[in-house]
Structures are given as C-alpha cells and as structure tokens.
Amino acid sequence: MANTNVFTGADGSITLSTPEGTEGEKAQEVLTDYDMISVGRVQNVSVEVKSDVKAFHEIGQRYATELRPGNVTIRGTIGRAYINGAMLKLLLGEAASNRPAASWAQPSFNVTLMVENPANPDVNNTVTLHGVKLDCWNYNMPEDDFLMESISFQALYMTVADAA
C-alpha cells in the first residue's frame, strides 16, 4: 500500500550513524562526545538529488532523440540552533581542535531523515543518506533573533524506505 499521508516538519526526526572505516571512527568520536545520535534543534533541512541527464540531438531534429543518464549528485543543508562545535568537528575532524602537521581524515557519517505522524504511527517515510561529508559551515549571529549554524553536505548515495 502506497503512503498517501501528508507530513509536517514537526513529524520529522534526524539521526546520525557511522559507517565502518577510519572516517566513520572519526565521526563516531564526535557523535559520542556530543551525544549526537539524535540531532535536535534543527530547521530548514533540505536534500537535493540531481541527475545530470544528457540529451542527444540529431542534426535536423528539434527534439532530443535520446536522454542518457549522467552523474548523480546528492547534497543538502541543515540549519541548527544548538551551537556546540559538533558540526564544525564533523567538518574538520581533528583540525577543529589543533592544526595537524599533515593530512587528516575527514569524518564521514550517515544521516537518517524519518517522518512519522504520531496519529498514524504505522505510516512513515525514511530517507538515509550514506557516506555524508560536510562541505560548508556557517554561523549566523543576528541582533535580535536566535543564533544559528548552517551546514551543507554531500552524500555518496541514498536509500528510501516507506512503510504504510
């Protein structure tokens, strides 16, 4: 049965997990130190999946003859009002605490976005982004509003699971 329910941001949650390997271990250190398995105080979460579809046009034809799939890019942003350095450490790894003499491993982790209506808990939608790396961190300190940090990220691939 297909999911036909609607959700709001209040129905959502974000959890982080780590893959195996050195980059996953670096991310696990940050997640453990900052108790970040469940990410709180977020807003304006966006995920964009882009496929570079290439159109082949024959000479003398106005419409494309064929559409060929190209590279797939997965990226997104998260705004967060809980400023504590965790996201910056997920971006920079050990370079957030000191300046390493040589190259270092950038943490890599998985992000799971789940929406579930409390009135209908058997229906949910889960998107898991795998191999996520942060590529930008912004800090906003407005005069009369909440302090916010914003991150942008890229992911290697994603999986989707619906339960209805």
Image (cartoon, rainbow, N blue to C red):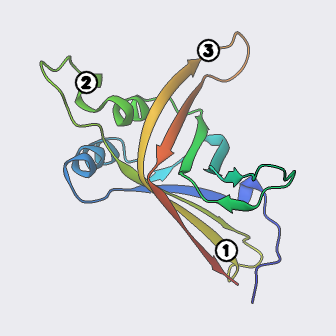
**Residue identifier under label 3:** 141
Q: Is residue 6 above or below residue 147?
A: below
Comparing 33 with 5, the one in front is 5
Q: Position of residue 11 (x, y in %)?
A: 71, 61
Comparing 19 with 70, the one in front is 70
Real-space CA distance between mark 2 and mark 1, rounded to the nearest whole angstrom: 38 Å
Residue at 21%, 18% in the rendered image: 98
**Residue identifier under label 2:** 95
Residue 37 appears in the picture as rendered: no
* Callouts 3 and 1 close, C-beta under 8 Å: no
Real-space CA distance between mark 3 and mark 1, rounded to the nearest whole angstrom: 35 Å
The type of residue carrying mark 2 is Ala
The type of residue carrying mark 1 is Asn
Mark 2: give few (<14), some (14-19) or many (20+) Cα within 10 Å: some
Tell me which numbered mark, 2 or 1, is placed earlier along the sequence: 2
Real-space CA distance between mark 3 and mark 2, rounded to the nearest whole angstrom: 23 Å
* Callouts 3 and 2 close, C-beta under 8 Å: no
> How many dots with numbers?
3
Mark 1: give few (<14), some (14-19) or many (20+) Cα within 10 Å: many
